[in-house]
Image (cartoon, grey):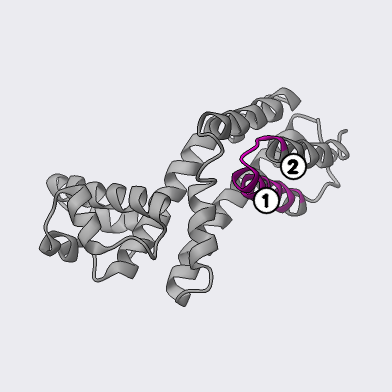
């Protein structure tokens, strides 16, 4: 059952408690890593008992998968105002500036919440990896739709391959975020995004 489906099956109070647990776990996993996050730590941060956690999640892996879906919702939600409402090339510049500004304000610490989870969990159990795959597919679809919007505006040629471009944009974003986090400098991220947007511009109509 996905996080959204599980939440719908709960009472309003249950949804709030479950969300509080997921938020606490997400914060701990972002700062301490998944391996460094314990059920006891989640209990302390969320101010709940173990019995409450095990009421909503069968084990730590189940909680981890809920965190992945929650982080995907959060990350995609922050990018959505840009990617779902493409007005022209200026939207891509605004999106790039938005991404870079987030990292600058964070001191280039932490990187992408979803990317960090993927780095740690991509070789874990198949069910968790499948949740990661779905999350990145959602992000890739957002880029694919954004490229299609450029076509609909007559700004990108119809022969451009939406899928290739969407993958290039996502890869540039994730790679740029990793370099930004490692170097503690937004310059690699800005260069990576400029390169991806420049690649899109090669298909300008």
Residue plotted at (49% across, 35% down): 78
Percent coordinates x, y for residue 181 in the rendering? 59, 45
Please tell me whether residue 65 is drawn above or below residue 161 in the rendered image: below
Query: Which of the numbered marks, if any, corresponds to residue 4?
Result: none
Q: Is residue 2 visible?
A: no
Circle 2 crowding by C-alpha within 10 Å: few under 14, some 14–19, many from 20: many
Nearer the observer, 187 or 143: 187
Lateral position of residue 145 relative to residue 72, left or right: right
Kindly report the secondary structure that dominates the magenta region of the rendered protein: helix
For marks 1 and 2 on the same chain, the one whose residue lies earlier in the sequence: 1
Magenta-highlighted residues: 165-187
User: Which secondary structure, mark 1?
Assistant: helix
Residue at 72 percent across and 40 percent down: it is 188
Q: Which residue is pictured at 24% across the width and 52% down the height?
A: 21
Taking the spot 23% from the left edge, 46% from the top edge, the residue there is: 20
- Picture quarter with the C terminus: top right
Tag 1–tag 2 contact (CB < 8 Å): yes
- Residue, disc 1: 175
For disc 2, the marked residue is 192
Q: Residue furthest bottom?
A: 125
């Amino acid at each position: 059952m996905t996080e959204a489906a599980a939440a719908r099956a709960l009472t309003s109070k249950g949804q709030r408690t479950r969300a509080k647990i997921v938020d606490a776990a997400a914060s701990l996993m972002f700062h301490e890593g998944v391996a460094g996050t314990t059920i006891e730590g989640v209990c302390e941060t969320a101010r709940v008992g173990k019995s409450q956690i095990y009421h909503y999640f069968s084990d730590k892996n189940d909680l981890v998968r809920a965190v992945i879906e929650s982080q995907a919702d959060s990350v995609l939600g922050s990018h959505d105002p840009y990617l779902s409402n493409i007005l022209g090339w200026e939207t891509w510049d605004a999106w790039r500036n938005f991404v870079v500004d987030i990292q600058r304000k964070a001191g280039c610490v932490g990187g992408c919440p979803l990317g960090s989870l993927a780095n740690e969990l991509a070789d874990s159990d198949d069910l968790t990896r499948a949740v990661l795959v779905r999350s990145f597919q959602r992000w890739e679809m957002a880029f694919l739709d954004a490229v299609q919007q450029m076509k609909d505006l007559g700004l990108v040629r119809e022969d451009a391959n939406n899928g290739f471009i969407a993958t290039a944009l996502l890869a540039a974003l994730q790679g740029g975020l990793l370099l930004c986090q490692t170097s503690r400098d937004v310059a690699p991220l800005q260069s990576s995004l400029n390169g991806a947007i420049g690649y899109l511009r090669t298909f300008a109509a």
